[in-house]
């Protein structure tokens, strides 16, 4: 069964993260991803960046669903 930790490893392997938290039930997951690489990107572009890293896992159907919140470090800090 797929774990949140596995997804965290995949994301960290492809994106520099200052904060990363993944939670889920083995099939559906949600992630908070804070990264400086998101600076200057739209919400859609940020998600596309993450999806590009995870695409092999979506294509193989190991990963079925991931909702994500992608923030810059400055945005995360302002939210507390």
Image (cartoon, rainbow, N blue to C red):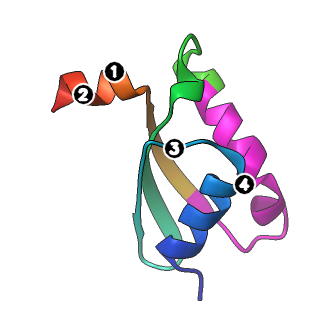
- Which residue is the extreme one toward the left? 80
Q: What element does badge 1 sit on?
A: helix
The label shown at residue 54 is 4
Estimate how packed mark 4 is, as few (under 14), some (14 to 19) or many (20 or more) residues with alpha carbons within 10 Å: some
Vertical side of 11 occupied by 25: above or below: below
User: What is the distance, in whole Å, between disc 2 and disc 1 at their CAs?
Assistant: 5 Å
Q: Which residue is mark 1?
A: 74
- The answer to whether the residue labelled 4 contacts the one labelled 3, judged by CB atoms less than 8 Å apart, is no
Q: Residue at x 42, y 70 (%)?
A: 24
| Residue found 59% across the figure and 89% down from its top | 1
Q: Residue furthest bottom?
A: 1
Residue 33 vs residue 30, the one in the foreground: 33
Say left or right for 52 vs 9. right
Predominant secondary structure, magenta span: helix
Callout 2: 10 Å neighbours few (<14), some, many (20+)?
Answer: few
Is disc 2 in contact with disc 1, using a CB cutoff of under 8 Å? yes
56 sits left or right of 64 in the view: right
In the foreground, 10 or 47: 10
Residue 17 badge: 3
Residue pointed to by mark 2: 77
**Inter-mark Cα distance, 3 to 2:** 14 Å
- The mark closer to the camera, 4 or 2, is 2
Q: Quadrant of residue 73?
A: top left
Q: Is residue 7 magenta?
A: no
Which stretch appears magenta?
Answer: 46-65
Q: Return the disc, 4 or 2, that comes first in the chain's sequence.
A: 4
Residue pictured at 52% horizontal, 79% vertical: 3
Residue 31 locus on image (x, y percent): 44, 52
Residue 51 forms part of the magenta stretch: yes
Dot 1: within a 10 Å radius of its alpha carbon, few (fewer than 14), some, or many (20 or more) residues?
few
- Disc 3 to disc 1, C-alpha distance: 13 Å
């Amino acid at each position: 069964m797929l774990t949140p930790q596995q997804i965290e490893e995949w994301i960290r392997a492809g994106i520099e993260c200052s904060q990363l938290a993944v939670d889920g039930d083995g099939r559906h997951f949600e992630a908070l991803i804070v990264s400086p690489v998101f600076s200057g990107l739209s919400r859609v572009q940020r998600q596309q960046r993450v999806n590009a890293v995870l695409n092999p896992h979506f294509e193989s159907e190991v990963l079925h669903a991931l909702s994500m919140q992608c923030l810059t470090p400055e945005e995360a800090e302002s939210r507390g």
